[in-house]
Image: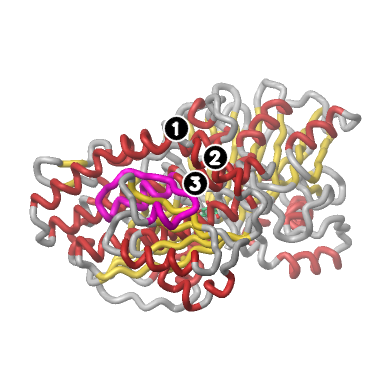
């Protein structure tokens, strides 16, 4: 959601800002803009659509001067439609102050009403524009921009990652954060602020993560950070650990396809150094301090959104089956606002690829406020959820750029399986059983690779179904959440309506929809529900539905029923979703590509959803 970048230093700012915006395109947005200060004048260009549309505008008459200070923004619309006027940056009445913002100002109407009475003139429908005017008002009686921003943000209620420039102080950038990520890139004679490390890594690896309620001032030669209450704070400088090539496409047509194909490696990375095969156990260093609390917890509560919520559902099946521990899975947004009842000893586990999802972060804070131990399972190192959790496990999937989550999902499942083995062994699961699980886990990268090595059948099926309007995905047990995930992948990137259901529930509703125009994807590995799922397939065939079945290599029964089959290797029940989801990701991908969809940046979606 919303990309933010600001640059100050000796180089020409515009190409740096545009490149930074391109690096953050994956986050999801619908308009883009740039502000520069050159010779004491503020220059703004903005445009609905993509960064490339903005570039065209700049090239076709909307020239911007060479400048050594500037900022850029990609907006994901909340208040006001995604048009040129509502795009950021927003300026004050005198065109001296420019503001870019990620988040939502909840009391913007009250502030706007007051500012209108004081004579301010507004041009957009956004909540962000009030910040520019509020700073303008305070700046009249405040000696410097830093304090004007600090004082303005004390009046604001809501969330923000904010960057501000002023022609009166063209040698500094001011940034403030409350709930929306901002990272400061510390360079040599130049400094950068961005919403995302992907926009910084080309320039420097040294970063400072701005915290909530903190304000930073960047000049070319330094960075000062203070609280909103004007207390100076010394921030730790950290090192970015990923490489530039990890956020580039590496020969693939789309990031999503690259990330699907990375899964043998990312799954390996998620388990690397954590398996104790001899002992039939695992080691999760990040949990060592709280392991006893997890093991003795009466209940584990997962809170997550989207794909991460699907991973949590599979974790529930794993933990209940092997660790015999009571588990609840909550949509983070519902958990947060439902007065959840947490009992003594309950442990709350947040799962989030980005570690920045606003609903999940709010659930974390609610759980903490109620005194629960909170654990974060995140991908992005140094993200808000990772930092605010009492303890955690990184999934180590590397940067995920495609909006539709793929490799993060399978890595989340690996970490959940590790957690399951850790708890199960402490609660009496025999060593031999542990060894069996660990050994099978080690085989997964190879098994995933075998699916990825032959995608022709999946491409063919995709070509047969690319003009369909509705899809149903069915599975049972561990593969019910996999069906939800398959359906989500398809709707996210191809805009085909798709629903996931527990296969046995079909007869309580979705069966009414079955006819020759309603393809049904069955996830039917040879597990204990196999016979039952065969019956469900019969029910679909009896109504002329077309069946695509994900089966194990040696399937015979289903072979006679299904119209199309995709084989995946056999594995233990808890790992079946890790293999089954690979063809589901590829099916969605190839259908979307053949429909001409923008796979990496599907309409209306954001990678990291930083508003509630
Ligand atoms: C957005 C993304 C999804 C993701 C969900 C949760 O909707 O488009 O791919 O699953 O947020 O994100 P998180 O970063 O918390 O896992």
Between the C-alphas of marks 1 and 3, the distance is 29 Å
Q: Is residue 111 left or right of residue 336?
A: right
Instruction: Name the disc covering residue 240, or none.
Output: 1
Of pointers 1 and 2, the one earlier in the residue sequence: 1
Instruction: Name the disc covering residue 459, or none.
Output: 2
* Eye-nearest disc, 2 or 3: 2
For the residue pair 330 and 96, the one nearer the viewer reads as: 330
Q: Residues within 10 Å of mark 1 (few under 14, many from 20)?
A: some
Q: Secondary structure at mark 3?
A: helix
**Residue occupying image coordinates x 50% and y 74%:** 337
The region drawn magenta spans 558-582
Residue ranking furthest to the right: 61
The location of residue 326, given as percent across then percent down, is 26, 70
Q: Is residue 228 visible?
A: no
Q: Which residue is mark 3?
A: 585
Residue ranking furthest to the front: 560
């Amino acid at each position: 959601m919303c990309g933010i970048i600001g640059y100050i230093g000796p180089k020409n700012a515009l190409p740096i800002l545009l490149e930074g915006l391109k690096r953050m395109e994956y986050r999801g947005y619908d308009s883009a803009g740039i502000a520069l200060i050159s010779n004491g004048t503020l220059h703004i260009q903005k445009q609905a659509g993509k960064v490339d549309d903005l570039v065209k505008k700049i090239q076709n008459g909307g020239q911007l001067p060479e400048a050594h200070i500037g900022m850029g923004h990609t907006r994901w619309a909340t208040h006001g439609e995604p048009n040129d006027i509502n795009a950021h940056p927003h300026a004050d009445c005198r065109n001296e102050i420019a503001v870019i913002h990620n988040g939502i100002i909840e009391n913007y109407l009250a502030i706007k009403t007051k500012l209108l009475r004081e004579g301010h003139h507004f041009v957009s429908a956004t909540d962000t524009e009030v910040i520019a005017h509020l700073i303008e008002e305070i700046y009249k009686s405040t000696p410097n921009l830093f304090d004007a921003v600090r004082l303005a943000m004390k009046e604001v209620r809501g969330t923000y990652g904010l960057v501000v420039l002023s022609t009166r102080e063209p040698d500094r950038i001011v940034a403030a954060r409350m709930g929306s990520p901002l990272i400061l890139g510390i360079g040599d004679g130049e400094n950068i602020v961005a919403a995302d490390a992907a926009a910084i890594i080309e320039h420097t690896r040294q970063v400072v993560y701005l915290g909530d309620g903190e304000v930073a001032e960047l000049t070319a030669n330094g960075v000062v950070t203070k609280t909103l209450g004007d207390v100076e704070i010394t921030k730790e400088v950290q090192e970015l650990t990923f490489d530039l090539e990890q956020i580039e496409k590496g020969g693939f047509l789309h990031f999503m396809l690259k990330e699907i194909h990375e899964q043998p490696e990312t799954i390996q990375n998620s388990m690397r150094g954590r398996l104790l095969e001899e002992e039939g156990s695992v080691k999760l260093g990040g949990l060592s301090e709280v392991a006893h609390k997890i093991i003795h917890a009466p209940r584990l509560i997962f809170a997550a959104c989207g794909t991460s919520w699907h991973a949590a559902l599979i974790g529930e099946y794993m933990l209940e089956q092997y660790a015999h521990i009571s588990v609840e899975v909550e949509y983070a947004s519902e958990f947060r606002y439902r007065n959840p009842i947490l009992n003594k000893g309950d442990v709350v586990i947040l799962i989030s690829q980005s570690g920045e999802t606003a609903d999940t972060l709010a659930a974390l804070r609610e759980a903490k406020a109620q005194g629960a131990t909170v654990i974060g399972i995140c991908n992005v190192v140094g993200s808000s959820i990772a930092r605010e959790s009492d303890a955690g496990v990184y999934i180590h999937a590397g940067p995920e750029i495609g909006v539709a989550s793929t490799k993060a999902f399978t890595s989340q499942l690996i970490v959940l399986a590790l957690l399951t083995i850790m708890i199960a062994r402490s609660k009496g699961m025999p060593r031999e059983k542990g060894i069996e699980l660990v050994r099978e886990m080690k085989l997964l990268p190879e098994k995933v690779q075998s699916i990825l090595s032959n995608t022709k059948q999946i491409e063919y099926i995709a070509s047969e179904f690319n003009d369909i309007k509705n899809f149903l995905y069915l599975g049972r047990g561990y593969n019910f959440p996999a069906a939800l995930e398959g359906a989500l992948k398809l709707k996210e990137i191809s805009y085909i309506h798709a629903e996931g259901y527990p296969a046995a529930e079909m007869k309580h509703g979705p069966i009414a929809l079955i006819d020759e125009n309603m393809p049904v994807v069955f996830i039917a590995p040879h597990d204990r529900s196999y016979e039952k799922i065969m019956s469900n397939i019969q029910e679909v065939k009896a109504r002329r539905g077309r069946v695509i079945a994900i089966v194990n290599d040696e399937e015979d029964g289903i072979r006679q029923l299904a119209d199309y089959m995709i084989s995946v290797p056999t594995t233990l029940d808890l790992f079946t979703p890790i293999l089954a989801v690979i063809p589901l990701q590829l099916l969605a991908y190839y259908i979307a590509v053949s429909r001409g969809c923008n796979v990496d940046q599907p309409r209306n979606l954001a990678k990291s959803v930083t508003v509630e």
